[in-house]
Amino acid sequence: MLLLRTRAVDAVEEMDRPDCDPARLDRTYAQFAMVNRAVAGWRGIYRQRLRPLLSAETATTLLDIGCGGGDVAVLLSRWAARDGLRLAVTAIDPDPRAAAFAAGRRGHAGVTFRRQTAAQLLRDGGRFDVVVSNHVLHHLRPDELAGFLAESAALSAGTVIHNDLRRSAAAFALFSAGALPLRGSYIRQDGLTSIRRSYTAAELRDAAPPGWTVLPRSPYRNLLILGKAHGRRAGAGA
C-alpha cells in the first residue's frame, strides 16, 4: 500500500489540533481505555518486564510520559496493587486538555497526574526507577526523537520502555475495520493517522541511538527499551 510505504511525518491527528471539539476529545480519551486494553499489550509488558522489578516491601517509582487520558498509568497501578506490590506512578502530559481529563479520573489511587513535559521534570530533578510511554514515539518529528529518548533515559535510574504502534498494511486494515463501532470520537480517524505516522521495526532501529533495543511485538507493536544496570533505587521522583 503506497499510503504506508513511508512515515507520514507531516500528518496531523485531529485531537492534537487546538480547535478540536472538546466533547469529542473527551470521548476519545474515555475510549482510549478500552482500545489500549485491547491492543496496546500493557498486560503482557507488566507481567514480563515491570512486575519482576517490583517489591512488596519497597516502593518502585514509575513515570508515564505523555499519559494522555491516564488510563495506562491507572492500569499499571491497579495491577501492581492486586499483586500486593508497591508502585508509585507519576503521569505527565503537557496538553492541558489531557491533564484535566486525567486529573478527573476516579479510582486513581497511587497515581499522581501532572501537566508537565519530560524536559521540565528533568530540570526539576525528577528521577524514577522506571520510565514508560504509550503511543508517543510516532508523534515526534525525526529531529525530536533523540532529545526525547535522552530525556527519558536521564529520568530513569533503571529501565525505559516506550510502547508504540508498528506501521503495516495489515495493522491499518484491521484497525480501520475494528474501530468502526467507536463513534463520536477521534479514535478511528486519528488511529489510522497514527499508524501512518508510526515506525516499522527497521526504521526505529535506524532512528534510535546506540544502547536502545527494538522488540517487535504482536499485534503490530514496537517496544523501544533501554535497560540500565541495577543500582540503588531512585527516590520519590520529584
Image (cartoon, helix red, strand yellow):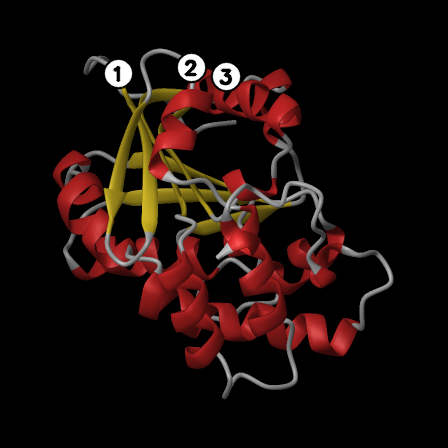
- The amino acid on which the numbered mark 3 sits, given as a three-letter code, is Ala
- Residues marked 3 and 1 touching at CB (< 8 Å): no
Q: For the point 58% across and 68% down, which residue is it? A: 29
Residue 101 in percent (x, y) is at: 64, 64
Residue 61 visible here = no
Residue 151 % position (x, y): 53, 20
Which residue is rendered at x = 35% and y = 31% of the image? 202
Considering the numbered disc 2 on the image, is that residue within a helix, a strand or a loop?
Answer: loop
Which residue is denoted by mark 2 in the rendering?
209
What kind of element bears circle 3?
helix
Mark 2 crowdedness (10 Å alpha carbons): few <14, some 14-19, many ≥20: few
Which mark, by number, is residue 228?
Answer: 1
Query: Which residue is found at the position 34% from the left and 64% from the top?
Result: 39
Residue at mark 3 to residue at mark 2: CA–CA distance: 9 Å
Q: CA distance from mark 2 to mark 1?
A: 15 Å
11 left or right of 89 in image: right
Gap between marks 3 and 1 measured at Cα: 13 Å
Near mark 3 (Cα within 10 A), the count class, few <14, some 14-19 or many ≥20, is few
Q: Could you tell me residue 65's position as x and y percent?
A: 51, 39
Name the kind of residue labelled 1 in the image. Answer: Lys
x and y percent of residue 218 in the render? 24, 55
Q: Which residue is mark 3?
A: 150
The answer to whether mark 3 and mark 2 are in CB contact below 8 A is yes
